[in-house]
Image: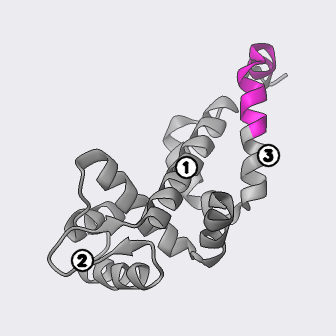
Amino acid sequence: MVREYILEAVRLATPGMEDYIEQIYLHIEAKGIARVSDVAESLAVLPSSVTKMAQRLDREGYIIYERYKGLELTERGFKFGKRLVMRHELLEQFLRIIGVDEENIYGDVEGIEHHLSWNAMDRITALVEAMEQDDQFVKKLNSGQ
């Protein structure tokens, strides 16, 4: 049931919505609260843009938005936000393992994370787990052999 709920969220969320949900989740995890101004700063957008998206996310059932209060994730938003952060972290880990230069990793992840299916993410997860257990493969990969 929970997986179906998350998969429903995945189908309905746009890449822009995902970025906001992910940032709201990260702020709540780090500070216990997500303020419109903090999310705006993190995403390099105007607070009015965050307010508009917060209203949309509230209508879609991801957050609870009340003017002049912090942004609160619903259960649906929390689970989806956690999954989005895990996706981001997994892609960073994958790119590090395969030897992508550190200065390129964040931009590369931002460029690809919304374009991969959750099925592709499942396969990348399995690949990362396998590579972590095979040091020789990773050494070969990074030595160019």
- What are the residue bounds of the magenta stretch? 126-140
In which quadrant will I find the N terminus? bottom right
Query: Of label 1 and label 3, which has the lower sequence position?
Result: 1
Q: Residue furthest left?
A: 68
Label 3 vs label 2: CA separation?
37 Å
Majority SS type along the magenta span: helix
Left or right of 104, for residue 21: left
Query: Which residue lies under the disc numbered 1?
Result: 88
Left or right of 86, for residue 78: left
Q: Position of residue 36 (x, y in %)?
A: 24, 71
Q: Name the amino acid, label 3.
A: Arg
Query: Which residue lies under the disc numbered 3?
Result: 123
Query: Which residue lies under the disc numbered 2?
Result: 47
Q: Position of residue 12 (x, y in %)?
A: 61, 78
Classed neighbour count for the residue bearing mark 1: other residues with Cα under 10 Å, few (<14), some (14–19), many (≥20): some
Q: Nearer the viewer, mark 3 or mark 2?
A: 3
Classed neighbour count for the residue bearing mark 3: other residues with Cα under 10 Å, few (<14), some (14–19), many (≥20): few
Q: Is 37 situated above or below 12?
A: above
Q: Can residue 59 be seen in the rendering of this structure?
A: yes
